[in-house]
Image (spheres, rainbow, N blue to C red):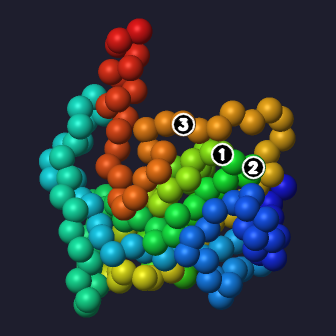
Amino acid sequence: MILTGPEIAREREQGRLVLHPFDPAHIQPNSYNLALGPTLACYTAQVLDTRRPNPAVVMPIPDGGFVLEPDRIYLGSSVEVLGSNHLVPVIRSRSGAARLGLFVHVTADLIDIGSIGQSTFQLHAVQPVRVHAGDRLAQVTFWRPQGEITLYDGKYQGSRGPQPSQIHRDSAETASR
């Protein structure tokens, strides 16, 4: 069951979910708008590898914005720290950003219950799009789980800023077993 905007605010007030900083103007009928943080990360390798760390550079978004080019993946992050030990957050693009051909979460929109941190946006533009720090590009919805809860305690817990892929750690953990 999805929470309505007013219920998101109530659950936050009761300490059952984290949204910080919180601005009541960002509440929508069944979501909360998230703003793009001040930095972007971009991989430096032409070919990315699932079995190795992929080098990336982190750069500030200039005052005049940053143009996202097609055929690249850029990593940004939410300004807001978010998450819950009671609810499941799901991140999606806002329709205004999607109508510019901007994918905010390429496919990984589900945030595990118990994960609390800034959300990494996987930004992909269909055509060049200029983004600015503070743009409200994404929205988070919160869903009530059913069944026994196991809290997330993984490699992205407590994230701050854009986080490059750590998928290579999965192969290393499997190989060490």
Would residue 87 be seen by someone viewing this image from the given angle?
yes
* Residue 177 higher or lower than 25, as above or below: above
For this orientation, the residue located farthest to the left is 45
CA–CA distance in space, label 3 to label 2: 14 Å
Q: Are marks 2 and 1 in contact (CB under 8 Å)?
A: yes
The amino acid marked with disc number 3 is: Asp
CA–CA distance in space, label 2 to label 1: 7 Å
- The crowd level at tag 3 (other Cα within 10 Å; few <14, some 14-19, many 20+) is few
Determine which residue is flagged by label 3: 153
Give how far across and how far down residue 85 sits, in percent.
Answer: 69, 48
Q: Is residue 83 left or right of residue 44?
A: right
**Sequence order check, earlier mark of 2 and 1:** 2
Rendered-image quadrant of the N terminus: bottom right
Determine which residue is flagged by label 2: 86
Determine which residue is flagged by label 1: 113
Kind of element beneath mark 1: loop
Q: Name the foreground residue: 49 vs 78.
A: 78
Q: Name the foreground residue: 114 vs 78.
A: 114
Give how far across and how far down residue 51 sits, in percent.
Answer: 28, 28
